[in-house]
Image (spheres, coloured by chain):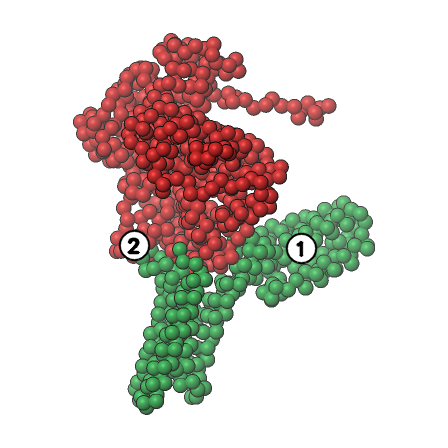
Amino acid sequence: MNEASELGVERPGRWDKPFDSNMSDEHVRSVLKVAPFSLIDAQKFPKSMPLAGILKNDTRLVTYKRGDLIVREGDYGSSAFFIMSGSVRVVVDSEATKLADKALGRTPPKEKNWKEALSQLWTNAKVPEYRASVKFVGNAVPGGGAGLRTEAGNTRVFLQDVSAVLNEHKTVQLHEGEFFGEIAALGRTPRTATIFAEADGVELLEIKWQGLRDIRNHAPQIREHIDRIYRERSLLIHLHETPMFAHLTNEQLEAVAAETQFKSFGNFDWHASYKTVIERTASSRLNDEPIIVEQGDYPNAVILIRAGFARLSEIIGNGHRTVSYFGRGQYYGYREVFHNWKNDASVPYQFTLRGIGHTDVLIVPSQVIEKLVLPTIPKEQQPWFAIESKTTSGSDQLAKRDQQNRVGTDVLEFLVENRYINGTAAMMINLDRCTRCDDCIRACANAHDNNPKFIRDGKQVGNLMIGHACMQCQDPVCMIGCPTGAIHRETLKGNVVINDLTCIGCGSCAASCPYENIQMVETRNAQGEYLLDKATNRPIVKATKCDLCLEQITGPACQNACPHDALVRIDVSDRIDLVNWVKR
Amino acid sequence: MITFRKRRMIGVSVSLVLATLFIVCYRKLTDNLVSTATCSGLLLFGFILFLAAYNGRKRITFLPLGKSSTWLQFHLYSGYLCIVLFLIHVGFRTPHGGLETLLAIVFGLVAGSGIVGAILSRMIPRRLTQRAGTIIFETIPLLRRELKDSVDALILNSIELTGKTTIADFYAYRLASFFVGPRNFWSHVQGSERHLSRTYANLMGLKRYLSHDELTVVERLADKVREKDNLDFQYSLQLLLKYWLFIHIPLTFSLIIIGLFHGIYASLWT
């Protein structure tokens, strides 16, 4: 009996740990007095998730001082902001990126020349993880100098000379009652601007994406506001970049945009549960992936992937078999809609499309496609492949699919199940060719001051292994939560890199990386002694990971150093490259 | 992306054409009573220097000197051409004289170790992957120690559990040394599992003296034996892959030194 009672525990709830435990009922009441929160009909929220509950558990009030950076261009964030009091400045000119870089002590990466490259032979450190300096000191450059300060356990980056920034950059003022950061938070896209507090005492309501999503779902005015901003700022660009719409005029594109709906599937924080989810059975994982469209349903829309990933599968026996995967910019349903427009006999969706992790989609109704897109579509844009007959036996389908995929279903399932499809530069190793010589590791160490940045080990499928090297993810969840913006996308090639001087060693990126590709290392001086924190007497740690040899003239050293062509840095979403390499 | 098959075809074809060209030139020149020794010697020595330069390329990884894999392809086919050039240089006859013989032996060893290395580099990775996936070579001693500790604990527990020392005695006399360090190197290289069958047979033979509880221990011990054998397999084959170069590279430099001496000597006396 005792054992039974001990086993009975309370199910963990979403609000067990609030965003900020200091958010009191009094604070919530003060927020509810401000428009647009005062205009929201609280009765429309479910009892299990009241508006006051969302505000108390998924938001926090943060006060900023003059010059404090609130969001930085290019960073990833999982929350939006509402200005309660004061005003903020948005840097909108073309120099904004430079400001963000300069303000954060980020030196724009520069490719080494021959002399600098060769000098690594004698300038590389003799001890592991040597650092000449471990801390960023504001350089006091007008318009660029910044500093770090810690307040209530949070590290803040601030601009030292706000007036100079205001003089040198074009900025826009946002006032009380305005939102910002909501598109980046909900769409998992990089912040598009750098925003800082204009004066002391700017009070912002920071809303976690989950809270924002739920408020958006139940408060039409918030939904309309967010959708309007997205339509104004991003939708037309996204549609324009989609090949299916490339031939449309601006007016037609606007008409498509007007009819397009947005929807999100899955869990935004998928990386937090990744390690437990991956241990479960394939069918159990599949059941948890939200269905976007289902095989056999009437194709009433074309689905465009706006952010995240989706799995395309077909029913085989009692299960589902993965036949493809989609990422940002790809779409599904077009072939079926085209078929039904062209033929009398209609066909249903041929496959099931599921969200993997967190997936944002755009839903373009088939009537819109039939009316605006298909009548004027050039021949080369028409789907050239016919809808397959589903009357063929399962084994025939399997054989046919295998031939098409060529990498084999086992590899495909492996890449999707483990979310390696996220990688734009995954380290793939053909173990049938790898002689385990470790030339790749030596080359990596040579390129990084004698510190290798990856581990030649990882998950395997058949003769393929994905090594523990930063994959330069499309959805870099490691960037979420970095308090100083040390981990960021650099401006030269768009690689995710860590600014060593502003990394405070909090480990947030390493903990967030689902693939265990970021390591925390203890830094040393030239004598090989650990650099110790004066306050705690503990070693100063830094996050480290593969930067794809950004500054080397050779490109990725590991790939160049492999004598047997056993190792490649590959964009997993590029199926043609993948198949060519695997079948080489 | 060029396939390996196509790359191999190109490499072999170009090498065959060049080898034929060398032989035809040699025949033409010797038919006209022109000595080819100096010319073929210099060409051969140049090839050897180029082959040795690959080792330098592997160390200088941060200069854009071409991919290591491209260098290896040139290294392999140039190596085969070197054998042809060597035969031309010695006039397709057996060497005579101390220095010539020494040079020929060293050349033979370098070429032979290179060919063996190329074959090992193609064959062993597949075997490693098929049997036990990937274990990092440097971690094997640690894994071996952990395994040994777990087996020791298993045996001690069995004594406590059963009150008998039958398994412990067997372990002490027959198996303890197996778990201490790497074993059965040549069996693993040859792909033989006879040593494993023999150990299993001994374990099976032991079963007739054991109680039910002891049988469970023996089954777990058999699993540990398999685990250790996998480690030995990885260790043996990875050792071979790593250390054949320790023959090939020093011999290459010996060849360069002796060859240089031979060249100077020949130029002085001819």
Depth check: give the residue in front, A80 or A355: A355
Above or below: residue A574 compared with residue A185:
below
- Residues packed near mark 1 inside 10 Å, few (<14), some (14 to 19) or many (20 plus): many
Q: Which residue is denoted by mark 1 in the rendering?
A: B225
Q: The red chain is which one?
A: A
> Based on the displayed image, in which of its 4 quarters is residue A27 positioned?
top left
> Based on the displayed image, in which of its 4 quarters is residue A8 positioned?
top right
At x 31% / y 28%, what residue is drawn?
A: A252
Q: What residue type is labelled 2?
A: Ala
At x 28% / y 36%, what residue is drawn?
A: A101
At x 67% / y 55%, what residue is drawn?
A: B225
Dot label at residue A117: 2
Element type where label 2 sits in the image: helix
Same chain for the residues under marks 1 and 2 in the image: no
Does residue B200 show up? yes
Above or below: residue A112 compared with residue A27:
below
Residue A525 percent across, percent down from the top left: 36, 46
Above or below: residue A91 compared with residue A413:
above
Q: The green chain is which one?
A: B
Above or below: residue A29 compared with residue A81:
above
Depth check: give the residue in front, A339 or A406: A339
Dot label at residue B134: none
